[in-house]
Image (tube, rainbow, N blue to C red):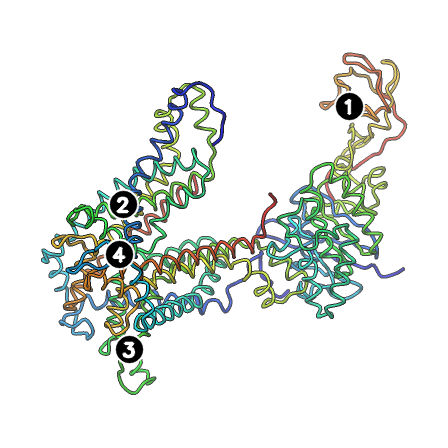
Amino acid sequence: MAERAAGRRTGLGWLWLPLGLCALFLYLPILVLVAMSFNGGGSAYTWDGFSLRWYGELARDSDLIQAVVTSLGIAAGATAIATVLGTLLAVGLARHTRSKLLEAASMAPAILPDLVLAIGLLAFFYAAGISKSALTVLLAHAAFGTAFVVAVVRARLAGSDAALEEASRDLGAGAFSTFVLVTLPSIAPAVVAGALLVFTLSLDEFVIAYFTAGPTTRTLPITVYSMLRTGITPEINALATVLVLISVVVVVVAARAMRRQEKS
Amino acid sequence: MSTRSYGGLATRLRRGVEPAVLLGPGLLFYAVFVAIPVGLVTGYMFARRGRFGGVEWELGFDNFARVTDSVYLEVFRESLGLAFLATAIALLIGYPTAYAIAKLPPRWRTVALVLVVVPFWTNFLIRVYAWIVLLNSQGVLNDVLVGLGIVDERFTMLYTPGAVVVGLVYSYLPLMILPLYAAIEKVDDELLEASTDLGAGRIRTFLGVQLPLTLPGVVTGSILVFVPSLGNFVVPELLGGGKTVMVGNLIRDQFLKAQDWPFGSVLAMMVVVLLVLLFLGQAWVTRRVEGGARG
Amino acid sequence: MTTPLLEVREVSRSFGNVRALDAVSLTIAENEFFALLGPSGCGKTTLLRSIAGFEHPDDGAVLLGGADLLALPPNKRPVNLMFQSYALFPHLSVASNIAYGLKRERLPKAEVAQRVAEVLETVGLQTMAERRPAQLSGGQRQRVALARAIVKRPRLLLLDEPLSALDRKVRAEMQLELKRLQHEVGITFVVVTHDQEEAMSMADRIAVLAEGRVQQVASPLELYRHPANLFVADFIGTSNLLAGPADGERLMVRPEDVRLVGPGEGKLAGTVVDTQFQGGTSTVAVQVPQLDKPFLVTEPGATEAVRGKAVGLAWDHAVVVREGLT
């Protein structure tokens, strides 16, 4: 008997072509970046032998290291604020209101173009007489980070009903205890996911930081931006490679964690 | 939340504490750091540029008139065109890719989605830089093209509108693929089988059933690519070399260089209005496709 | 002897180690209301989908009016399938859903419109033509799915568990509806179901399947009165099973064939443990020492038996059935 396709889904057939081209499109630039980070010569384009010197330069670049520290600090602070506010907000939205307007408003910062938020905050800090610094960037990131936490936690709560919490109250627990002992554990994975999301977004965020940073505040993206504007050396390639590696690790770990979550 | 409340004021106050504690801090934070900023920008639209920068609160509509200046209209036209082109290309690449991923066996689907997301989690600026390297006249792409004999000599790919479009597509392609994948995956296989059973060939089934049912995903993906592309200033600056000016660059310049905040506010608000219109359009499409559930 | 409309010959299909269909053979006549009946996993749905074209047998042949059906792709077979979930296109109106299949036949617009209108009247949904599936009730959606398949006038209409998604009262109405429709439009219906009551009330003939093999093909009455083996006897209707005359055999007595008599009379004696009044009949459960399960007796009207009463069981008609599956 001739071979027949098994099951409901047939093979990909011609779809392999666009899939392959897309993969090429997405990864070719990155591969070239990584390859050129080992370039012996000073050009970012022409190959001149294998060398690790740019990684050395990277390690010695104190400005860059300072920028990384600044970024990490801002990200940590923004994540802390965003996670707390966002979680509370998401629970409040899920259990205490049916207003679609309120729900939309809670996620507005994530939907607005970052440029609009950036100029708004620039105007705000100017009008309020608050001088720009790392703190202003932190608050700005916290604002739009909260929206993402709300989105993630809200999605998790959408499926569940209030039965568990009602049972807790019925058994005698007060509102606060119920929140800590029942609600939080059930949304914990979403809260963690949201926190990681905000942290990553903050580290990576350029536009809002660019507008709200003080003259001496240099986050990592801002530093990279000025490096790109001034002189292009393979040091940037080395930095890029390191960042790509970190991204890969983070995404793979997150995917594994999510898959383990789904299985349990 | 219209439950009849028994008990007196004290009970009602007590019952109101929980929502207040939950919703209060977040909404307050938003009010200060989102609502007020956006409100300020909205207000600036009607104000006037101060003599030494800053803002003077004289109510006027000059800024709106200035927008219709041919110079700015040209920028708008080009921005919309480039953003639209980037969106169309992203859709053309993204739909078959998402469709292919949806047809992979489950385990490979996760791998594929991870692979799609990884470049996206790499720093945005780095990704733009990658194309600066690739498209440079001394760069790899030129080498390859010359080597393969497709072109006779190196040519300038960088600092062209084309480079800007490529940069935009590259930056936001994953945002097109993910919602498309979600929409394609959601289509009940049985609907496609029913179409086949009723006599439709593969192309007809795609056009008549699959495409209409994935239309909300197409719209979502398109918005997720179009809006950031429109408001982008990094890509036009780095890949367009300042020769291609988009709305994003205009806005940035008004706020950081020309210090004409009121005018910049009008430009920014136009983007926001466009965004709102697109969202309303998306809601309309979704409702049409899902056909209004029983009330 | 006229050629049967559908001939299934030795069709087999395996999924990995599981043999979903094992050399299944049966024939279906023109204009019949045929049912494929069996528990889940017996292969009935696989067989149905094989006829429709969405499953591909490893072995065997399927002939429709004498021609090889398996050689045709599903969209070219003169066979239509009504899905268990109805699979109505959510983005199209009722009328457009129904017209979908007709449009594929490239008929003139006027004819399409006329046939759609006709079939809407046949199923009683004339007023719903412009509604969307999401706005209809379960019973209405089913009728649209039916209309969509019937309007193409297929030679064979396959229905996958057509009544399973409906609530009880609607289900009873739809059983009559389906029978009426089948007579009115004169199409051969093949229904897949796990509900033996459904199959018994609607079908002219039933094929009982278990573990991928046909156990018996017969009319409902024949299946009820003369089941081929223990499985069929137990699956169809309620039965009381006693030890049989020989090894590998059992004696089956239907509850309505049993009379309650005095404790000393009859073939068995026991104590009443439960009585249920169901309106037209009563079911009496009698605990008999030799049996693990209570012996069930159906009496017309209200029974006089009460819990604890000692009774005897007598019957005239019993059937010997083979143990084991075909």
Pointer 1 local density, CA inside 10 Å: few below 14, some 14–19, many at least 20: many
Chain containing mark 1? C
Please say if the residues under marks 1 and 4 sit with CB atoms less than 8 Å apart: no
Residues under numbered marks 2 and 1 in contact, where contact means CB atoms less than 8 Å apart: no
Q: Mark 4–mark 2 contact, CB under 8 Å?
A: no
**Mark 4 / mark 3, whichever is N-terminal:** 4
Give me the residue at 43% from left, 36% from top: A94
Q: Position of residue B70 (x, y in %)?
A: 32, 73
| Residue B33 badge | 2
Q: CA distance from mark 1 to mark 4?
A: 93 Å
Local SS, label 1: strand
Secondary structure found at label 3: loop
Mark 4 nearby-residue class (10 Å; few <14, some 14–19, many ≥20): many
Chain of the residue under the numbered disc 4 shown in the image: B
Q: Nearer the viewer, residue C251 or A125?
A: A125
* Residue bearing mark 1: C295
Quadrant assignment for the C terminus of chain A: top left
Same chain for mark 4 and mark 3? The answer is yes
Q: To which chain does the residue with label 2 belong?
A: B
Tag 3 residue = B157
Q: Name the residue type under label 4.
A: Ala
Q: Nearer the viewer, mark 3 or mark 2?
A: 2
Residue at mark 4: B47
Closer to the eye: label 1 or 3: 3
Position of residue A224 in the picture relative to residue C31 (left or right): left
